[in-house]
Amino acid sequence: MRFDETYSGKVFIGSHPNYDESKAVLYGMPMDWTVSYRPGSRFGPNKIREVSIGLEEYSPYLDRELEDVRFFDAGDIPLPFGNPEKSLLEIETYVHTLLKDDKIPMGMGGEHLVSLPVMKAVASKYDDLAILHFDAHTDLRENYEGEEYSHSTPIRKIADHIGPANVYSFGIRSGMKEEFEWAKEQGMHISKFEVLEPLKEVLPTLEGRNIYVTIDMDVLDPAHAPGTGTVDAGGITSRELLASIHAIAASGVNVVGFDLVELAPVYDHSDQTANTASKLMREMILGWVK
Amino acid sequence: MRFDETYSGKVFIGSHPNYDESKAVLYGMPMDWTVSYRPGSRFGPNKIREVSIGLEEYSPYLDRELEDVRFFDAGDIPLPFGNPEKSLLEIETYVHTLLKDDKIPMGMGGEHLVSLPVMKAVASKYDDLAILHFDAHTDLRENYEGEEYSHSTPIRKIADHIGPANVYSFGIRSGMKEEFEWAKEQGMHISKFEVLEPLKEVLPTLEGRNIYVTIDMDVLDPAHAPGTGTVDAGGITSRELLASIHAIAASGVNVVGFDLVELAPVYDHSDQTANTASKLMREMILGWVK
Amino acid sequence: MRFDETYSGKVFIGSHPNYDESKAVLYGMPMDWTVSYRPGSRFGPNKIREVSIGLEEYSPYLDRELEDVRFFDAGDIPLPFGNPEKSLLEIETYVHTLLKDDKIPMGMGGEHLVSLPVMKAVASKYDDLAILHFDAHTDLRENYEGEEYSHSTPIRKIADHIGPANVYSFGIRSGMKEEFEWAKEQGMHISKFEVLEPLKEVLPTLEGRNIYVTIDMDVLDPAHAPGTGTVDAGGITSRELLASIHAIAASGVNVVGFDLVELAPVYDHSDQTANTASKLMREMILGWVK
Amino acid sequence: MRFDETYSGKVFIGSHPNYDESKAVLYGMPMDWTVSYRPGSRFGPNKIREVSIGLEEYSPYLDRELEDVRFFDAGDIPLPFGNPEKSLLEIETYVHTLLKDDKIPMGMGGEHLVSLPVMKAVASKYDDLAILHFDAHTDLRENYEGEEYSHSTPIRKIADHIGPANVYSFGIRSGMKEEFEWAKEQGMHISKFEVLEPLKEVLPTLEGRNIYVTIDMDVLDPAHAPGTGTVDAGGITSRELLASIHAIAASGVNVVGFDLVELAPVYDHSDQTANTASKLMREMILGWVK
Amino acid sequence: MRFDETYSGKVFIGSHPNYDESKAVLYGMPMDWTVSYRPGSRFGPNKIREVSIGLEEYSPYLDRELEDVRFFDAGDIPLPFGNPEKSLLEIETYVHTLLKDDKIPMGMGGEHLVSLPVMKAVASKYDDLAILHFDAHTDLRENYEGEEYSHSTPIRKIADHIGPANVYSFGIRSGMKEEFEWAKEQGMHISKFEVLEPLKEVLPTLEGRNIYVTIDMDVLDPAHAPGTGTVDAGGITSRELLASIHAIAASGVNVVGFDLVELAPVYDHSDQTANTASKLMREMILGWVK
Amino acid sequence: MRFDETYSGKVFIGSHPNYDESKAVLYGMPMDWTVSYRPGSRFGPNKIREVSIGLEEYSPYLDRELEDVRFFDAGDIPLPFGNPEKSLLEIETYVHTLLKDDKIPMGMGGEHLVSLPVMKAVASKYDDLAILHFDAHTDLRENYEGEEYSHSTPIRKIADHIGPANVYSFGIRSGMKEEFEWAKEQGMHISKFEVLEPLKEVLPTLEGRNIYVTIDMDVLDPAHAPGTGTVDAGGITSRELLASIHAIAASGVNVVGFDLVELAPVYDHSDQTANTASKLMREMILGWVK
């Protein structure tokens, strides 16, 4: 008696109605309470779903259709407003469940801090986990004005957790001097400014590895992603980011989970960035869930 | 495995999960293809749902909570783009089903033309039907530049169908001279400019009657409803429209169906009008579904 | 071979194609170079034309149609950017021509300073001229930081020109202490905050007089006219302003010219204010050009 | 060597350059991390300053100029992002300092929760303190989904602190049933929907009392204050709110502190709400700091 | 007595006042009633004219000025709202008249379906017609949910009409699998993702041929054309599209007509896309009308 | 007693509190009264300061931090609205003072005309001055519709002043035929369309020279700088402009002053362009103030 939701914008286009039969699960993490500049990414996941109906279900890049992949859209995890610690805990708990059920977790932020509990959960399942991190910002602070759980710290925390040598950052063009120095000292990979070329060099070295990919929308130039909390000029095009997704798809790595974060609809006139996020998500699903 | 949708913005807040157990059914009619000025109301129904999570479920006006009313949100009726006739037919068919199941139809537009098939369906069930129509515009044209099914004709068509004397228009401040003259000749009630006062005079005369209420958001002043296709200065406040809803609730009429149309989100900065539409809908549900 | 422009938004809806046969002439004065706060009203006149196609040509308030009034839309007077003095001179010259041809000048601003040369030209034709001025601001400064021709000085300049006792301001809620004191000393009428009630008292005293009316959109509350350079809370509704226009129409004064100024489209989301300005202009034309 | 800041928009217009010589102190509390719906009010205080340059320094309502009142604009209190408890503590500490220095605290939010530590600090100085609360929402929850410090709880917390009988709420039109019932049981004053009339009845009963006034911008109708986190139709006009400020000024109460909260610039097209907030602040300063 | 319109924004800048003396005719096709996602392109043509006054009349790319080309701006063809079939018929009739008068038709959309009747009319005059199609989308569906005349079908319909081998699509990055397969089977040229390079390869093979060019604004990346109905990430820059226009100008093909479609102003903050469309149109006129 | 302003958005991030100890001085020139198209750049300088708090103080491009450079932010020069001549005089006087104090002038516009008095003042100090000019427009008109001081004339005026051979323009893609011809005749360098490559050729020829750099934001493509008065498609990316700044920093020229003009916040949704301007300014300060 309810009209079919597949093309309603309430779930991601082409998602499967059944959790158990699905190989991957899409979920939102609507949290933005630690951001220091412009909040609003809590509304990101639902916006990505909403505009997904403007997409075709077929990718001419990958020659694959969404109906070829069974993925379930679970909606947004309910999170306690203004309480980062409890929020992170609930995310981590949820992802553990997904992993136990052998689902590939596909997250949508929210601020970047939401990736931390996901990566922790994934790391607890996969010993050899490496992380590919696409971002304008290092996110390598130990704390932000005393707060350990901040949008500026997730990559540092996970690097501390799985070892800096297992984290690869691309497109970085903003951070404190100390962050860049720390990464250098610790042997963590940071590609400043560039994405596709260094990625193509890194991927062969990761063949066969289990990989988690976390993409902050602001790795894109503000021209391509104005709708995010902290825009930073000098970024890459959506074309280069699509090519990077396809390069990962064509490589020998094994993507065991991924997320796309920091879409903030209130700064996104006419859903330009949301539409791009939605297409990126389609390509990630079609390219990485095999 | 899917997170509860009640507070997700995907259904109207407080809606019941089960059709059969519900007394009333909320549905969207996402059509705007005959509008002559500014299109966009096709996205109205989902926007009303989305912002409904900003509402409390309790009305201090009516001292009643949404959980006291069982209503089901069925989603949007899928309609064929650019084909008005087929679209109207599908709406009418759907509402006939609701009426057969003894559900109160509660529609969300879409352009005002979507109300026509609903009113026709309701009129086929209730012989004595009267219509209360709140609008800035007469909508009494016989056709619009030759097109019979147009956003400018629904009230004329239904007046022709159930008799002009059974139609009561309030707040009208725009139309062609011929339309006002036709109404006068036909004995149809038109309250120019005013709403609450004439409504209070009309309601006692309708005691015991079955009533369908259709509200065009543009009966509100542009200050109160900028997010609609055709704004028209000199309208009423949201406060007066709320009071009108409450006056109907307190009267002796029997509301057997209603709709709220012409919310066009793309013209609605920061969802001002959408939030108002959402509150109006809550009050209509709490006040009219008994 | 060119499609009819009447409903194209390029001229005001219902305007007559021929200057000579017209009784009144509509023209734009696209100047905003002396404003101290937010510029942009140069684009006002064309926006009023553009949105006029959303209007009906019939007024249910006045029971009159635009085809009953012959008025010509001459377009915008070309003005030299950044040169106030030369701009004012060109406006004055143009209006003199209109008056010589016995046309009623109907101007659209632009900043309020554009009204000054128009009022001067009109005063040179009509000895007994009185001015009705609707505004949030006194506009009674002698100069603004040394600049004599400023958006803050037009009413002072015309009051000096035709005598303060012949100027009646309504709705004023902003100005310097000195301005209010000067008006008091000079016997100039200022209705603080209120419009319709004091207007109804003033009008009988002006019976038979030739009147120029100048309306600054910001006499409206920001809720009703957000799209203007300097919004000021506590203003009147569009309903009250419409009623004021109608009160003038019903009175015994003889309107010999009028203008509507300070619509600034760039601050006007979804043309809310522009649509209102357009309706006000229709009512002024239908009510005042007899 | 720095250009004078008085008209720069960096401080509130007309503020005094010297703390010690000032009677009142204006400060911002840029926190919005517990809001459940739409964040963004952290940018409110600076926006109020920025647009204040569009104001005249003279009030024709009160016939008083800002230079007649010595107030210092201290800027925004630096607050730790995402940490409500620590933020509230820093606010409380700061206000204690102001009170010790015999300054009248004049705060700008931020979400409404920021008023709680201010009111606590003020209550510790004035035994007989009463609170006048203007808002669309009760803000009387004990906690919000388990979080005690939430934008939904400040009035409850202060009522618990100084006794519900000393708290007077006006304009309330949204809340849970339990909140209204609690207020009733506790003898707390709530004026549903109305503001000016009940205020005029309450004020004489408070003569001679020390009063703290807290105004949530959303007491205004969305037409008058679209730029806030949670708009709610059916509110009052800016005219009524101005009149309420003037009624307090004319009464026999002694205002010992006040705040204006919940301006969220990102939802405020063309600074409509910000300009209104700025004017309200001017009137509060001119009317209440004696 | 009307001010010169050349720089008024009511006609395209530099257009000639006389139809008979003009070699080419610019006209708008303000239709958007079959779009499935976001309507609004009906307002595209007038917006292109409006912003054209921000252009210089000289092209430093082509070293040519608009006064060197005689073209007439006829305004918008009046079309019946909500009736696609009748609308297409009126467009086709109009273009037949232009062709009979030996004018080069230069159209502005409107949704892409408006190009179909133009291409049909042009094909009836030129036997050897080839079509260059720049677009993000294939537009090769046979029908869209049963509707044959849809924004998704125009290229399929014209390919069926003149033979798929005579249609060349560039920049395509979205479509159904079936559409790409159909094109392949039929020997129709589709350049996926790329524009300038494949165009340079195709142009020499078309030397001496009569060519119609149809450009959908969404061939541009959303960063370069956010103001369109369906944005799709991964497109080309405005620089590449300008270079493509210049490549056609420098080639040996004979452009006998062209259009630019799908500008939707309501999604175009600050007229970014409109300004680009306007410049593209200037370059097409200067480069192609010889 | 006032909270530290360094991170308040009221001064540019990292600016030094003391004029005397600073090597360079940042100042705003809030004038836009001669622009022929869209005004609003008067609000540019304060917006650049406001969003600068979103920046890191460290540049990973230059490996340098703002605390390594002592620069003072003096605020905006107060300028008389609507009076270009007096405004230019006040700017020139101010910059003479800075130069006498041996400060490097760093200006923020405002329209491009504000650069003229600065360049004149700088030229009076440095005999061998050369100017690097980045812009979409030639700005080489002798006058604009009779007005000598116009946003279209500054480069012509300074070229006349210091000799056309000392002026180098890059990225130019708009102007009148006569302007390009004049430049050619006079031996002035104009790089049409391109920036970085020709700059790299020019820089070695300027080694050891004193250089003033003036950057009009519209040299960037509209995708990268929508928030400016006159956008013009086909421009460069922010990445190329950053690289150009770095190329100048790495060259042997001696930058003795610079400015960034034409940011117009009202056209800049979500501060995209402002954030870019702010980052460009940081890189110019870090790269050029040695």
Image (tube, coloured by chain):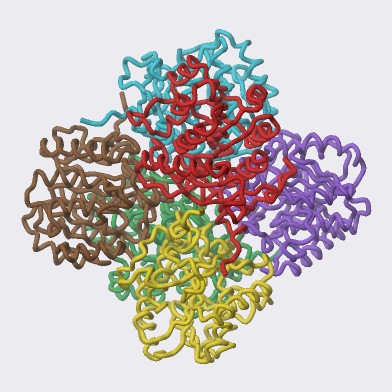
Chain colours: A green, B purple, C red, D cyan, E yellow, F brown
Q: Compared to D74, does F282 lie above or below?
A: below
- Number of dots carrying numbers: 0
Q: Is residue B92 left or right of residue D208?
A: right
| Residue A101 showing in the rendered view | no
As drawn, F66 above or below D44: below
Q: Residue A63 versus residue B123: which sits nearer the camera?
A: B123
Q: Quadrant of the C terminus of chain E?
A: bottom left
Q: Is residue A24 above or below residue F121?
A: below
Name which residue lies at 50% across and 73% down: E25
Residue F31 in view here: yes
Q: Nearer the viewer, residue D189 or E106?
A: E106
In-image side of D102 versus B283 (left or right): left
Q: Position of residue E220 (x, y in %)?
A: 43, 69
Q: Residue furthest front?
A: C100
User: Does B285 sit left or right of F246 as displayed?
Assistant: right
In the image, taking residue A229 as reference, residue F288 lies left or right, namely left
Q: Where in the figure is residue C242, as x and y percent of width and height? A: 65, 36
Residue B144 x/y as whole percent? 73, 61
Res. A6 image quadrant: bottom right
Q: Measuring 30% from the left and 62% from the top, which residue is drawn there?
A: F176
The single residue placed furthest to the top in the displayed view is D208
